[in-house]
C-alpha cells in the first residue's frame, strides 16, 4: 500500500461512556463487527465543525447528529430563503427568514437531543477562523466559494487539523479529505485560484438538489472513518461523481514536495482575484430610476442598453422586459461586446455580478456603464412583485 492507502490512527480517543439511552439509540452501530462500542465512544467524544448549513451542510449535519457526534459546530451567518428548500433539507417552510444556524440546531435537537450544538453565526474570515477551528477535532467544508476554501485549507494546516471537503455544481460533485500533516491540502489540488467568474456558484449555475445528499453523506462517511480510525480515508484521492451517468471516478493528488508550510492567513478575496471594493463603489442606479429610464426609452426620449449578465437558466425564470441577455463570462472574455457610444445599464440577480462587469468595463475605458443596485431581486420586490424570484 502507498502512504495514502494506509489506514490512519483514530483521530479521537474513546474516553466517553454511553448511557442506556445512547446504547439503545446507536445499537445498529454497536453490533457492526470492527466498529462497535469503542468507535461509538470515539464519536461521542469528538467535536466536528461544519462550515455552512446549506446544500452540503444540511445532510452532513443531520447524519453527524444521527451518528452520535458529541459536539457539532455550525458556521453560517445567512438566513433561510424559500429557494434553499429545494436542497437544504435541514430547513423547512417554517424556518424561512430564520438564521440557518438556529434552524439547523433546532432540526438537530429534534433528531438527536443527546448531541451538543454550538452556533457560530458569523462570516468565516481570516480574523476568526483559527479561533473557531481550535475548538474542534475535524472540519467539514461545504462552502461554495474559492476564497473560503483556501482559507479553510490554510487555517486547518496551521492548526494541524484534517478536514473533509465537498463541492457540488449542476450534476457533478467532488469530495476528498485533506490533512497537510499526513498528505495533500486543498492547495495541492488547486494551486491557483480559477479566474473570477470562470466557475459559477450554485446560485448562478444551479444544482440538482439530491446531489447534496449524495456528496454530503460521503463527507460524513469520511468524518466517521477519520474519527474512529475505521477503513481507508480519501486522503490523497478525490472522488468525482456524475449524477447524469451515475458514475464515480477517482483522481489521485499528492502533497507538493516543494510546498512551503502555511504560517499565516492572507487576504483570500485578493488571492482569488475578487474585487476589493463593495458593489456600491461602482456608479449605479436604483430600480426605481431604471423603471423611469425604461419608460422614457419606450416613449422615444432616451436610447440606452440594458443588459442582463445572469445565466440563461436564470433568465428563463424571470427577466426585465427590454433587457438583453449577455452572461457575465461572455462580457468579461470579450465574446460579446457592450456598446460604447450609449449609456449601458447592467443587472444580475442581486447586484454583485453586474458590479463586477461594470468595474471590468470601466477599467477598460467604458465610462458610460452603470450597475443596477439590488438586481432583479430588488426589481421584483419594488417594481413587479407578481414576478417570481429564485
Image (cartoon, rainbow, N blue to C red):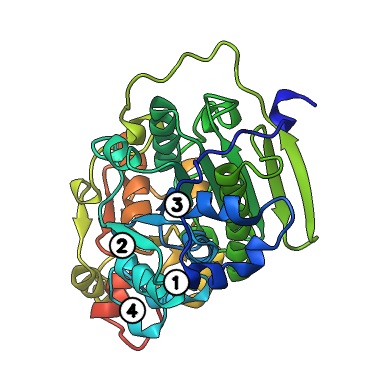
Tell me, for residue 366, which label it has, or none: none
Report the residue marked by disc 1. 112
Mark 3 vs 1, N-terminal side: 3
CA distance for labels 4 and 3:
37 Å
Query: Residue 251: where, in percent of width, then height?
Result: 73, 37
Q: Nearer the viewer, mark 3 or mark 2?
A: 3
Q: Are marks 3 and 1 in contact (CB under 8 Å)?
A: no
Helix, strand or loop at mark 2: loop
- Which residue is under mark 2? 78
N-terminal of the pair, mark 4 or mark 3, is 3
Q: Mark 3 packing: few (<14 Cα in 10 Å), some, or many (20+)?
A: some
Residue 136 position by quadrant: top left
Callout 4: few (<14), some (14-19), or many (20+) C-alpha neighbours within 10 Å? Answer: some
Q: Identify which residue is drawn at 73% across, 56% down.
A: 242
Circle 1 packing at 10 Å, graded few (<14), some (14-19), many (20+), is some
User: In the picture provided, is 30 more to the left or to the right than 79?
Assistant: right
Q: Give me the disc on residue 16.
A: 3
Q: Where does residue 163 sit, x and y in percent of width and height?
A: 50, 40
Residue placed farthest to the top in the image?
A: 258
* Front label number (4 vs 1): 1
Dots 4 and 1: beta carbons under 8 Å?
no
In this figure, which residue is indicated by the disc labeled 4? 96
Amino acid at each position: 500500500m502507498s502512504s495514502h492507502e494506509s489506514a490512519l490512527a483514530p483521530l479521537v480517543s474513546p474516553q466517553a461512556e454511553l448511557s442506556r439511552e445512547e446504547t439503545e439509540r446507536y445499537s445498529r452501530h454497536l453490533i457492526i463487527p470492527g466498529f462497535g462500542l469503542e468507535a461509538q465512544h470515539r464519536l461521542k467524544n469528538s467535536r466536528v465543525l461544519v462550515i455552512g448549513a446549506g446544500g452540503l451542510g444540511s445532510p452532513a449535519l443531520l447524519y453527524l447528529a444521527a451518528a452520535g457526534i458529541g459536539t457539532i459546530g455550525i458556521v453560517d451567518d445567512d438566513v433561510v430563503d424559500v429557494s434553499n428548500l429545494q436542497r437544504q433539507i435541514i430547513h423547512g417552510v417554517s424556518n424561512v427568514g430564520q438564521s440557518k444556524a438556529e434552524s439547523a440546531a433546532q432540526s438537530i435537537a429534534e433528531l438527536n437531543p443527546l448531541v451538543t450544538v454550538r452556533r457560530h453565526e458569523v462570516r468565516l474570515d481570516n480574523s476568526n477562523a483559527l479561533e473557531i477551528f481550535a475548538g474542534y477535532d475535524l472540519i467539514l467544508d461545504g462552502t461554495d466559494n474559492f476564497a473560503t476554501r483556501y482559507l479553510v485549507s490554510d487555517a486547518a494546516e496551521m492548526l494541524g487539523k484534517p478536514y473533509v471537503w465537498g463541492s457540488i455544481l449542476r450534476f457533478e460533485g467532488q469530495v476528498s479529505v485533506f490533512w497537510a500533516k499526513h498528505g495533500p491540502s486543498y492547495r495541492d489540488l488547486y494551486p491557483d485560484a480559477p479566474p473570477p467568474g470562470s466557475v459559477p456558484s450554485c446560485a448562478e449555475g444551479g444544482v440538482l438538489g439530491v446531489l447534496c445528499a449524495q456528496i454530503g453523506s460521503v463527507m460524513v462517511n469520511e468524518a466517521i472513518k477519520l474519527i474512529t480510525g475505521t477503513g481507508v480515508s480519501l486522503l490523497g484521492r478525490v472522488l468525482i461523481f456524475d449524477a447524469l451517468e451515475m458514475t464515480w471516478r477517482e483522481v489521485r493528488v499528492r502533497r507538493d514536495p516543494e510546498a512551503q508550510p502555511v504560517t499565516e492567513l492572507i487576504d483570500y478575496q485578493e488571492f482569488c482575484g475578487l474585487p476589493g471594493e463593495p458593489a456600491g463603489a461602482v456608479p449605479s442606479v436604483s430600480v426605481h430610476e431604471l423603471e423611469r429610464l425604461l419608460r422614457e426609452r419606450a416613449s422615444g426620449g432616451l436610447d440606452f442598453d440594458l443588459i442582463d449578465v445572469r445565466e440563461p437558466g436564470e433568465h428563463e425564470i424571470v427577466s426585465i422586459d427590454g433587457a438583453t441577455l449577455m452572461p457575465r463570462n461572455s462580457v468579461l472574455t470579450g465574446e460579446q461586446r457592450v456598446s460604447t457610444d450609449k449609456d449601458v445599464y447592467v443587472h444580475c440577480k442581486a447586484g454583485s455580478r453586474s458590479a463586477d462587469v461594470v468595474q471590468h468595463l470601466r477599467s477598460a475605458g467604458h465610462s458610460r456603464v452603470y450597475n443596477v443596485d439590488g438586481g432583479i431581486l430588488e426589481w421584483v420586490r419594488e417594481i413587479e412583485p407578481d414576478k417570481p424570484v429564485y
